[in-house]
Amino acid sequence: MTLDIIEVARVNPAADSVHNTSDSFTIPLTFFDLPWLLFSPVKRVFFYRLTESTREHFHSFILPNLKLSLSFVLRDYLPLSGRITWDPNEPKPSIVVSQNDAVSVTVAESEDDFSLLSGYGQRPVSGLHNLLPELPVSDDSASAFSLQITLFPNHGFSIGVVAHHAVLDGKTSSMFVKAWAQICKQLLGNGISSLPENLTPSYDRSLIKDMTGIDEKMIEILRSLKGDKTKSSRSLSPFPARKLGDDVVLATLVLGRDDIEKLKERVKSESPSRDRGLHLSTFVVAYAYAWSCLVKARGGSEERPVGFLFVGDFRDRLDPPLPATYFGNCMFPAGSYNHKAAEFAEEKGFATAVEILSDLVRGLSSRRIETIAKEFADSFGLPRGTQLGTVAGSTRLGVYESDFGWGRPVKVDIVSIDQGEAISMAERRDESGGVEIGMCLKKTEMDMVLSFFNNGLHN
């Protein structure tokens, strides 16, 4: 796989920033941010096909407009140019933006197969990693955000986005990319104007009140996971990344609107809980179906431990609710653990997964944050070898709405699902009501998952 690095640029927020950075601009992390402090960054790749994508056109027209619009949008998304630090005199870390801070932008060219990498079939995950930049992290400083723009001559380009999860969640990240795309599209037209309200971030953290010391509890959990229970450690170095073999592939499985409806009807006929009403959202049905296929593909003893979790958006669940455009994390994990593989591998395993997920989703509004935080902490004490599933992304983020002026992306992938038993989820690009599900597995296991997935839809 060939990749040529052309340059590594630094893009500063344009002058007249909404915040004065003559000294520094600081945002403390909240208990919604802290669970993600030491985990691997979130990595996404957006693919754009171009009708005119020669080197000359790209470097003289497309790239300058991408950089200039990035500079403009960073005025409103200033924390992305900063870093996480932990002042010795502060009880928890903060995002700090200082004068002349910038976002690192790697510019590259690739001779790899654009159609393969931007497709839905099995692709080597190493090829996707080539399209992502590094995100510098050390014990005392962690960059918030970095980008890589890669040209595939005569085919298109990709934008690789790497974001520190303690800085922002998927909703904020998607909002930023759409804001950047909108400003770029305006530059190609009649000039830029201010961002609309739905793409303008809100930084008011006074609305998130820690009344019961959850901040401190989350920090204790993180220190314990790193094997350091002393209160003096302030290391920001992440947990070691999972090493991947050459046989690991990423594939995108698709559920159409009709598939979702068919699966809902199947649950209604198989579930003994149907009379009390299930929360049969697209998310619940798609996640439950994908998870049951993953458990079956893993095989092994029916007594082996399994569990799964997801993150719930609490923006409108707090009192008072947060603005929809709140910048940062407002997601918190909720899960169900201590299950056995047999529960999901048997004939009614899909319906069982739906019932569990339905109860979890319904319970988000009534359960206290403290309870969910305690259960999240308990999930790290699961038996060794537990198959623990997670989900990244959402069908509500609108990732295919990010048009920079050269059309919508032909494909969007979350590559960071390679760091565990994770799947990704997004809306279908070309069909309302459908779902795209990303999985990253060894090829032999992926073949089995695809078999279970496809056969289950046609039985």
Image (cartoon, rainbow, N blue to C red):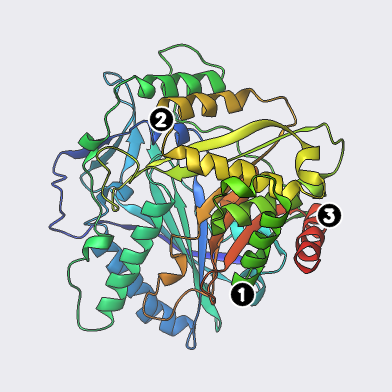
Q: Is residue 454 above or below residue 136?
A: below
Residue type at the position of mark 3:
Thr
**Which of the labelled discs sits on residue 114, or is there none?**
1
* Closer to the camera in the image, 33 or 341: 341
Q: Which residue is mark 3?
A: 444
State the SS at label 3: helix
Q: In the image, which is nearer the foreground, mark 1 or mark 2?
A: 2
Q: Going 26% across and 29% down the picture, which residue do you hit?
A: 209
Give me the C-alpha separation between circle 1 and circle 3: 24 Å
Q: Going 40% across and 70% down the picture, which residue do you hit?
A: 402
Q: Which residue is mark 2?
A: 369
Q: In the image, which is nearer the foreground, mark 3 or mark 2?
A: 2
State the SS at label 1: helix
Q: Residue 386 vs residue 62: left or right?
A: right
Q: Going 57% across and 55% down the picture, which residue do you hit?
A: 280
Q: Pick whichever of labels 3 and 2 is earlier in the sequence.
A: 2
Q: Going 82% across and 56% down the picture, which residue do you hit?
A: 448
